[in-house]
Structures are given as C-alpha cells and as structure tokens.
Amino acid sequence: MSDERRKWHERLDVTLWTLIIPPTVWAGHFLFSYLWAAISCAKEGAFAKFPTLFVAGTVLALAIILLSGWIAHRQTGMRGDSPPHDEGTEIDRLRFLAKSTLLLAGLSFVGVLFTALPVVFIGDCR
C-alpha cells in the first residue's frame, strides 16, 4: 500500500521513544500527585473537597496513555509475514514494538489509577 493511502497511525515511525511514552506519563503523573498533595497539605492542611487540578491532571495522563495504547493496538494488527518470524523485517519490528507499547500502556494506566486512589479515599493530610 502506498504511503498516501495508509492511515495516520500506520505512517507513524515506531521507535524506542514511542515505547517509553506511557511509563513516562505515569512517572510524570506520580510526581505531579506528590507535588499536588504536598502543596495542598502545606497551604490548607487538607485536600480540597473536589480537587479540580488533580482530576484534570489524572484525566490528561489517562487520555495520553489511552491514545498511546490505541495507536499501538492499531499497529499490532498490521499485516505482515506469518509466524515464525525468522527474518527481522521492518513490519515485524513495528509489531513487536507496538505490542510492547500496548502492554506498557496497560500497566501505566493501572499505575496512574492506583496513584490517584489515595486522593479518593484519604481526605486529610495526617
């Protein structure tokens, strides 16, 4: 299929940089969560009743991870040689990196949810 006719997610270059997007977003959210909790506790002594900034940061992190996982899912389904993959072709490399990215996106999604749970269940800064 020509480059003009392929969909936008098929035209993306998959590298190791795309593989680290979900865990990097997870780490960024983890840092954001601790900074938000420290600032909230220092200023007010308790979490807000509805922490708008924290919810927005969590939703943004989850959206980026979901987008990364969706792109990876779409790229794992690309046609190529059937197994066994004895030759390292470009499409095999793409599907391997896409599958790895998909698995990391799932782990990162769960990690962001678990990082956000204390704000839901803990209401004070003791």
Image: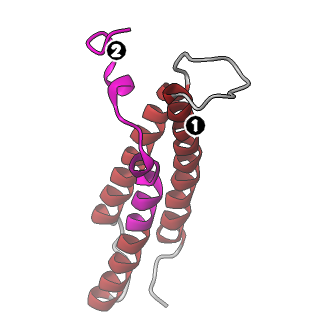
Q: Residue 31: which quarter of the image? A: bottom left
Q: Is residue 23 magenta?
A: yes
Residue extending furthest toward the front:
87
Identify the secondary structure beneath mark 2: loop
Q: Which residue is drawn at 62% across and 17% down?
A: 81
Residue at mark 1: 96
What is the x, y in percent for residue 58?
38, 57
- Which amino acid, by three-letter code, is at mark 2? Arg
Give percent across and percent down for residue 80: 57, 17
Q: Is mark 1 on a helix, strand or loop?
A: helix
**In the image, residue 98 above or below residue 53:** above
Residue 36, horizontal then vertical, whole percent: 33, 76
User: Quarter of the image holding residue 124?
Assistant: bottom left
Residue 5 percent across, percent down from the top left = 30, 9
Q: From what the image shows, is residue 126 above or below residue 110?
A: below
Query: Residues under labels 1 and 2: Cα distance?
Result: 19 Å
Residue type marked 1: Phe
In this orientation, which residue lies closer to the viewer: 52 or 82? 82
Q: How crowded is mark 2: few (under 14 residues within 10 Å), some or many (20 or more)?
A: few
Residue at 38% in and 54% down: 61
The numbered mark at residue 6 is 2
The residue positioned 34% from the left and 79% from the top of the image is 35
Mark 1 Cα within 10 Å, few/some/many (few <14, many 20+)?
some
Q: Which mark is residue 86?
A: none
Residue at the image point whose x is 47% and y is 58% from the top: 23
35 on left or right of 27: left
- The quadrant of the picture occupied by the N terminus is top left
Q: Is residue 82 left or right of residue 75?
A: right
Within the magenta stretch, is there residue 103? no
- Magenta residues (range): 1-29
Vertical relation: 49 (above or below) 40:
above
Nearest the viewer among 76 and 90 is: 90
